[in-house]
Amino acid sequence: MALLDEELVEQWLNKQRFFTMRGIKLGLDEIDFLCVRYDSTAPVCWHVETQVSFRPMGYIGGDTNARRRSDEEVRAGVEQWVSKKFTSERKRQKRNQLLPGADWQFVLVCAEVREESELALMGELGVRVVRYREVLEDLIEGKGEHQSSSIAHNIVDILRYVRARAAE
């Protein structure tokens, strides 16, 4: 499922006029997307990670098992996750290698989470959270300018068909 989710997220990013680089390997680690578009004179740069789960059993960060965690443990787990996914030295170096001096914004696309407070903490740490349903809604409604023949475009056509039939 992750591959299809990433296809749809990439389609959404392309519709917003981003040039996307996907699946950037860093040893055993990976960056889901690095995205750049030019608005006026300055580049807009996003580092996007996807975490699409419809029935989450554990937490996003740190100890991801299902046991109840204290607020401090949740915060520590989120800080660890943000560091691993966005702010580690390796990832910073890779972004700067591709576009030196750019102001990278961090974006997490997620569906459901076990603990909503994790998302608020991510916001405090500079991560913009976009819910997967928003991505799908934008695609279904045709927001954006980009058209493609990708598998994601075909999935969006299916979703539009289902929505249209449900409205009848």
Image (spheres, rainbow, N blue to C red):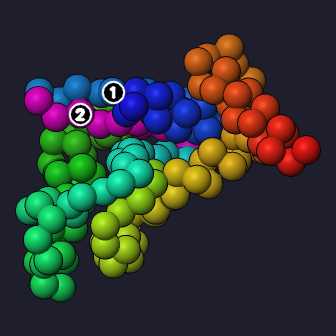
Determine if residue 107 is in view.
no
- Residue 69 position in % (x across, y down): 13, 78
Q: How crowded is mark 1: few (under 14 residues within 10 Å), some or many (20 or more)?
A: some
Label located before the other in sequence (2 or 1): 1
Q: How crowded is mark 2: few (under 14 residues within 10 Å), some or many (20 or more)?
A: some
The residue labelled by disc 1 is: 23
Magenta-drawn segment: 28-43
Q: Tell me the quadrant of the picture where the C terminus can be found.
A: top right
Most common secondary structure along the magenta stretch:
strand
Q: Which of 41 and 104 is in front in this view?
A: 104
Judged from this view, the residue extending furthest toward the right is: 168
Asked whether the residues under the numbered discs 2 and 1 touch, taking CB atoms below 8 Å apart as contact, a structural biologist would say: yes
In the picture, the disc for residue 30 is 2
Determine if residue 143 is in view.
yes
- Residue 99 position in % (x across, y down): 39, 36
- Residue 4 position in % (x across, y down): 47, 28
